[in-house]
Amino acid sequence: MSHRPNAAAVADHRPSPRACRSLFLSDLHLGALGSKSDRVLDFLKAHRAETYFLVGDVLDLWQPLLPHWTDEDQAVIDHLNQRQAEGATLVYLRGNHDPHPHRAPKAARPRVEAIDRLIHRAANGKRYLVIHGDCVDARLFRAHVFTRLGSRLDHALRSLDRVLQRLWRQSPGEARSWVEALLGSINTLMHAGRTHERKLVDLARAEGLDGVICGHFHLAGLHDELGLTYANCGDWVDSTSGIVEGFDGRLQLVFAPEPETATDTATAPLPAHGDLLEA
């Protein structure tokens, strides 16, 4: 469900907190069975930002009474709220999976009103449309019932996968599951033509902006192949990535290290060149 650029185009992950101007994360899907909330928290602790942009699908609470709301899910919300209390700015853009803000339990909500979109001015003066991205979906996929159906289907498949893993005595992180492979193949096929990128870049172009920062598609990316900057944060079900804005205004696509290689990756040096896209 995710696409990783080659190593020269991706920033490395470091064990000590990295200060940055802005951090853009999307599709955390907290409350869903597939959410890697423990890795979200590690990533947040490793990247200390002045402003946190939650670019939609932060909460995925379609299951009654939140049976899958875990301590790790709550820890992510608590960390973000604590950073806000410490003086950081928290911006929450609502995605198609996010429930109405007032329907989510108070303890599970970021302490900020959800908005639909905004214009972000980077430190270098460039301006970006920040939006979840579901607005360019086909009308059928934008239907509320379709979103809920998708959440329940994903939940059912991942539940079945966990049962099979227990029967086969395979740990969840041992290998990419057949569910992830199936859902990833479907998602890649659905967006094979990259029309969603063109549509979102066109929205930014129509407003005289320098690019767009989005989520939604679970396909991490950062490029200027369409004339403006296209930045997709990725997700925290499969790609485990985010967009970082440095204090010079440049954007960087950062992937969390795989759990089994976290120690080795954390000590590796940053690439000498090619790790940043000027944006």
Image: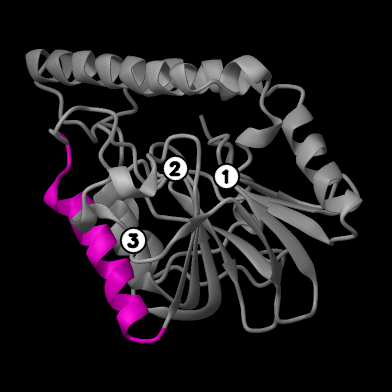
Q: Which mark is residue 29?
A: none
Model colouring: one colour
On screen, 20 above or below 216?
below
Q: Residue at position x 46%, y 23% from top?
A: 147
* Image side of residue 147 versus residue 230, left or right: left
Label 2 and label 1: CA atoms lie apart by 8 Å
Q: Looking at the image, which is closer to me, 46 or 134?
A: 134
Which percent across, then down, holds residue 216? 55, 38
- Residue 192 quadrant: top right
- The answer, for residue 16, to whether it is visible in the render is no
Residue that mark 2 sits on: 57
Name which residue type carries label 2.
Asp
| 145 with respect to 157 (left or right) | right
At 71% from the left and 81% from the top, the residue drawn is: 123
Q: Residue furthest front?
A: 102
Predominant SS along the magenta part:
helix
Residue assigned mark 3: 110
Q: Which mark is residue 215?
A: 1
Q: Are marks 2 and 1 in contact (CB under 8 Å)?
A: yes
Circle 1 or circle 3, nearest the eye: 3
Identify the secondary structure beneath mark 3.
loop
